[in-house]
Amino acid sequence: MSSAAALTWYARHEIRLAWREWLAMMTGSRGKRKRAIIALVVFAAIMHLPAYAVIGRFADLQAPLGKPELIVITATILLAWALMLSQAIESVTRVFYARADLDLLMSSPANLANVFSVRIAAIALSVIGMALLLSTPFVDVLVIGGGARWLSAFGVVVAIGLSAAAVAIAITVLLFRLIGPSRTRLVAQIVAAVIGAGFVIALQVAAILSYGTLSRFTVLTSDAASAYAPDLDSPLWWPARAAIGDGMVLSWLMAGGLLLLGAVMAVFSPRFADTVVRVAATTRAVCRGPRATAFRGGSRQRALRTKEFVLLRRDPWLLSQSLMQLLYLVPPALMLWRSFSESSDAIVLITPVIVMAAGQLAGGLAWLTISGEDAADLVATAPLPPSHVIRAKIEVVLISIGAIFTPLIAALAFASLTQAIVTALGVIIATVSAAAIQLWFRVQAKRTQFRRRQTSSRLATFAEAFCSIGWAATSVLAVTIPVAAVISGALTAAILAATWKISPRRG
Amino acid sequence: MVRGEQLDRSEIMKADVSALEVRGLTKRFDRPAVDALDLTVRTGEFYALLGPNGAGKTTTLRMVAGLLRPDAGSVAILGIDALADPVAAKQIMAWVSDEPMIYDKLTPLEYLEFVAGLWGIDPATSETSAHQLLASLGLEPHLHERCEGFSKGMRQKVALAGALVHDPRLIILDEPLTGLDALSARHVKGLLQERVRSGCTVIMTTHILEVAERMADRIGVIAAGRLVAEGTLSELRQQNGRGDTSLEDMFIALVDAGAAAA
């Protein structure tokens, strides 16, 4: 087989793998694939409604654009790029550490630079594919409202996807060089989480510090932002100009993206193999922990709780996921701090953010403790009733959430005691709801499968998200419009009840 | 029974109560996996359960260990009805699967502390016992290393130490020697024989017929969810009608006959 034919053959193999993985992630198991695809299509159709609500008003925008419009569009594109970069860093890290086929590839007589070039291209393709899927409802709304010129927004998605994949590879390989393989996995995950959330949070922080609100648009559309923004002919606005239909600029962007990815392939593909070898050599890294303390006594449930806390503390996956959730608490904390000096009604917005974060974090923790049991047989053969095991695990979730959110709620109590009580109740209810959903939909899984927990049961994922949103809305309404809170609370409770009704563990 | 105490095995094996008594045990998945199985293992006995892949060995032992609910039948462990009172049965029993299930982020010592805590063992006793067990399995240099870097053999040894740290009276092992090197396998076999000598009962499945031949007091052969032969090696030879037949030949003949009958 010629070199070109081998490359094509391997590219086809890699694309097939990426496609199947993506399909499995989107649709779950093979048996439910048809139903899942229909649900996905329906979901995509429904997504057009919120897309219309968010960007429908921008469809009529015509060139030349003013600075405020350019700033808003550019910031939106930058946010999308940050999210793609975050996803790409995760994908690259997985290529190094998920070694299912690396031994086979590395032991084969194939040209490794070519093999890894194809793999880099596959990462770029999967990142772009996901971004295209998510952006389709938004671009559709713009095309329907503003004409076919908005189709070029798809081109912008492709261009920024190419550059995001290129930058992700450069960041990850450089991390390997700087801090070594054993720490790169954790750091890369944290970097991905921070990049993913950081841009939105930075805008919120700026808005709070300058205008006392959580709205990101307040900063972007302010006079100050326009004053500091570069001139209209700056290349910074190229993505925005390309998105509204400037074909020439779009061509430049696409060429730039391809060039960047090509350069990264040329520079880093030969190093990929070295890096993989270094990772393989360090997978048996010895983690020593000085241990002078004697065995501790106590109840069997205490042993379970201690084990769960130790595992949570030592789990880098969870650390990065938790960090993502906790980052969103920075703006409300900042807002709280500001409200001590300036009385502001906007402080009420802290409640839903805290409740929502608690619900989401509790869902993740509950999955790890309840479903993510690495020694399931051991725990199942231990001499204590299953109900005691479950209770101990739920206690771990409640204690963790309590430890994280109590300081924030205590600080809130100094600003408004009523709001603090409502927030505390909201946090408790959201936590219990999330834990209950994880309990009803529990599966036997390894903790390393945490990233895929959302694909194992779409129903549980959506129920968890809707309940968190519902309890967050109920909490804020309880502070502002108590009658509406009753309706919102009843609706959320109905969602929870419906979830229980269709859960596999019912009864 | 206090571990380390050397007892007269013949006395132990004559005890009134069987270590395991299974009657009419049945489990169906898409086909019968275990089919009205009767099995008795005497106290203090080393019992090897043999059978081809998919014969129902693991399903049987998982039901005995309380990991799988049988469709029908009864399981008694040292006289305790394991289906009616699973907690009491689990207190005196240990289970080790072929795929070692341990926590990557814990050290072997932390893992054993957790297991001892789950079984409610006095910390002072369990700590001494944990150190002894890990030393006897050659894991002393790795006491404070997290298990994530361990080989499969090392992980299997940690899992075995976990099963023994609470001093069970019945140990059930599903293919415990899979993936172990010769030295590790010898460590494990030595430890199990020591337990049997001190009065513990061991039930083990294995595909290594030589291990069954050398270690087991009695051997049970299971095929298509049914016990097709049982006895000491010489009894099996007698049943098979050929005094000098190897266990391997007998095993193949019994399994073929069992499959034909099913």
Image: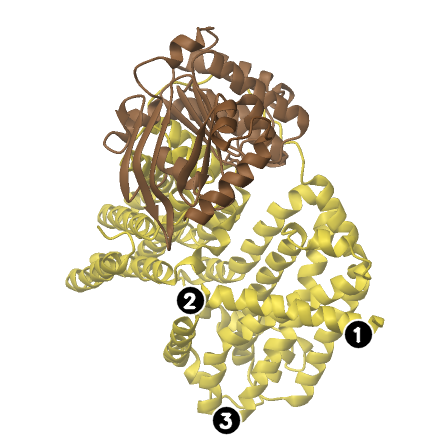
Where is A8 relative to B166, above or below? below
Callout 1 touching callout 3 (CB < 8 Å): no
The quadrant in which residue B22 appears is top left
Type of the residue with mark 2 = Gly
Q: Work out whether residue B260 or residue A34 is closer to the camera in this orientation and state it.
A: B260
Residue in view at x 37 percent, y 36 percent = A380
Residue in view at x 35 percent, y 55 percent = A356
Q: Earlier in the sequence, mark 2 or mark 3?
A: 2
Image coordinates for residue A505, horizontal then vertical, percent = 28, 51
* Residue located beneath label 2 in the image: A31
Please name which of the two marks, 2 or 3, marks the residue nearer to the observer. 2
Q: Work out whether residue B27 or residue A136 is closer to the camera in this orientation and state it.
A: B27
Type of the residue with mark 1 = Ala
Left or right: B93, with A230 as reference point: left
Colour displayed for chain B in the image of the structure = brown
Q: Callout 1: helix, strand or loop? A: helix
* Residue located beneath label 1 in the image: A5
Q: Which chain is yellow?
A: A
Please name which of the two marks, 1 or 3, marks the residue nearer to the observer. 1
Q: Work out whether residue A299 or residue A431 is closer to the camera in this orientation and state it.
A: A299
Q: Is residue A380 visible?
A: yes
* Residue located beneath label 3 in the image: A147
